[in-house]
Image (cartoon, rainbow, N blue to C red):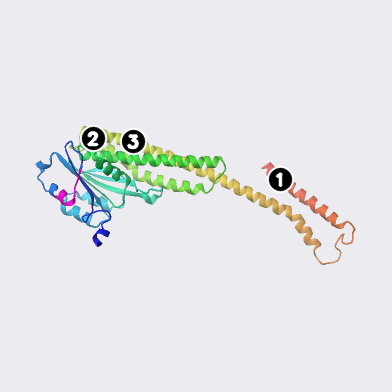
Amino acid sequence: MVLDNLSYGSDQSGLVCGYLFERGQAGRALATHEALEWLRQPHHAKENSFIWLHFNLSNVAAEKWLHEHLQLPQEFYETLHEGSRSSRIEHAGHNLIAVINDVLHDFSFEASDIATLWLSVTSNVMISARRKPLQAIDRLRNAVNRGESFHSPGALLIHLLHDQGDVLVGIVREVVRKIDEIEDTLLANRLNHKRANLGAIRRVLVRLQRLLAPEPAALFRLLQKPPVWLEEHDVQELRQSTEEFAVVLSDMAALQERIKLLQEEIAASVNEQNNRSLFVLTVVTVLALPINMIAGLLGMNVGGIPLSQHEHGFWIIVAIVVTFTFMAGWLAFRNRDSD
C-alpha cells in the first residue's frame, strides 16, 4: 500500500506507460518486465519494431531505472537537472535530445501551469519523462490507445510536436476570446478589475514565448543535418512543425502587444474616472466652503454679530450664502470647461 501511494500514477519503476510498435501494426501496451525483455533482444531482432516508454520523474525510482537499463547519453540526464528549460531539440551522438514545454491538464492561465517534458529518441527507442501530467504527451498517448499506427520513433516525435502546436493554438484562441470580452466590456464602460486579468494572461504569454522561442531555431538547425535514421517524410513533417511554431509565436507576440495597449487604455480610463471623482469631491468642498465659513463666524458667542437683531437677518444671510455658493460653483465649473 505504501508503494502504491508513492507511485505517482506509475508503477514501481516509474513507468507511466509503454508501447511496442511493430511494422504496420498499432501500438501494444507493455509492462516494465516486457520492455526489459525487448531491450535485451539482439539488435537484428528489433529491426522491424520500436518501443516508447513514458516515465514519471516524480517517482524517484524512474531515473534510477533509466540509468540501470538504458544506455542514454549523459546530455539527457544533464537536461533533467539544469536550470534552463527552454524548448530545444539537439543531437547527442545517435540520439535526439528534446526539451519540450507544455501546459498542465488543468491549465488555468497561470504561469505556474507550464511544465517540461524531456525526450530521448533513437531509431528504435523513444524515452519520454515528465514530472507533471501534460496535455500534449497525453494526446499522443490517447492517439496510440485509439489504434493510430506509427512507423518510427520520429513519427511519434512529430505527432507530439503537432499536438503541442494544437495545444498552443487552443491557448491563443482562448486568449483572443478573453481579450475580445474585455474589449467589449471596456467599450461598454463596464470595467470590473479586468486589468488584473490581462496582467495574468500577459504573464503566461510572456513565459510561454520565452520558453518556446528557441524551439523553431533548434528545429531549423536539426533540419540542416538530420539524423541518418530519420526518414525524408519525417524531415518534411518537422519542417511543417517548425513553420507552425513560428506562426504561433508570432501570434503570441501580437497578443502581447494587444494586451499592452488594452492595459494602457484601461489605466487611462481608470485615471479619468479617478480624476472625475476627485473633481466632484473638490466641487462639493468648494460649494460647502461659504456656508461653513459664514456659519462659523455667526456662531461665535461674541458681541457685534451683524443682523442679529434685524427682522430679516436670517434671509439676508441665506441670500449671501447662496450668492457666494453660486459664484464658487460657477468658477469651479468654468475652470473645468476650460480644461
Left or right: where does residue 258 sit relative to residue 303? left
Secondary-structure class at tag 2: helix
The reply to whether dot 2 and dot 3 touch (C-beta < 8 Å) is: no
Give the amino acid at mark 3: Glu
Q: Earlier in the sequence, mark 2 or mark 3?
A: 2
Packing grade of label 1 (10 A; few <14, some 14-19, many >=20) is few
Count of marks, rendered view = 3
Secondary-structure class at tag 3: helix
Label 2 sits on residue: 234
Front in this rendered view, residue 123 or 82: 123
Label 1 sits on residue: 333
Report if residue 124 is visible in the image: no
Task: Give the residue displayed 66% in from the left and 52% down from the top.
Answer: 281
Left or right: where does residue 65 sit relative to residue 257? left
Task: Give the residue displayed 21% in from the left and 32% down from the top.
Answer: 232
Q: Earlier in the sequence, mark 3 or mark 1?
A: 3
Verify whether residue 248 appears in magenta. no
The reply to whether dot 3 and dot 1 touch (C-beta < 8 Å) is: no
Verify whether residue 35 appears in magenta. yes
The reply to whether dot 2 and dot 1 touch (C-beta < 8 Å) is: no
Label 3 sits on residue: 244
Give the amino acid at mark 2: Asp
Report if residue 303 is visible in the image: yes
Q: CA distance from mark 2 to mark 3?
A: 15 Å
Packing grade of label 3 (10 A; few <14, some 14-19, many >=20) is some
Give the amino acid at mark 1: Phe
Magenta residue span: 28-36
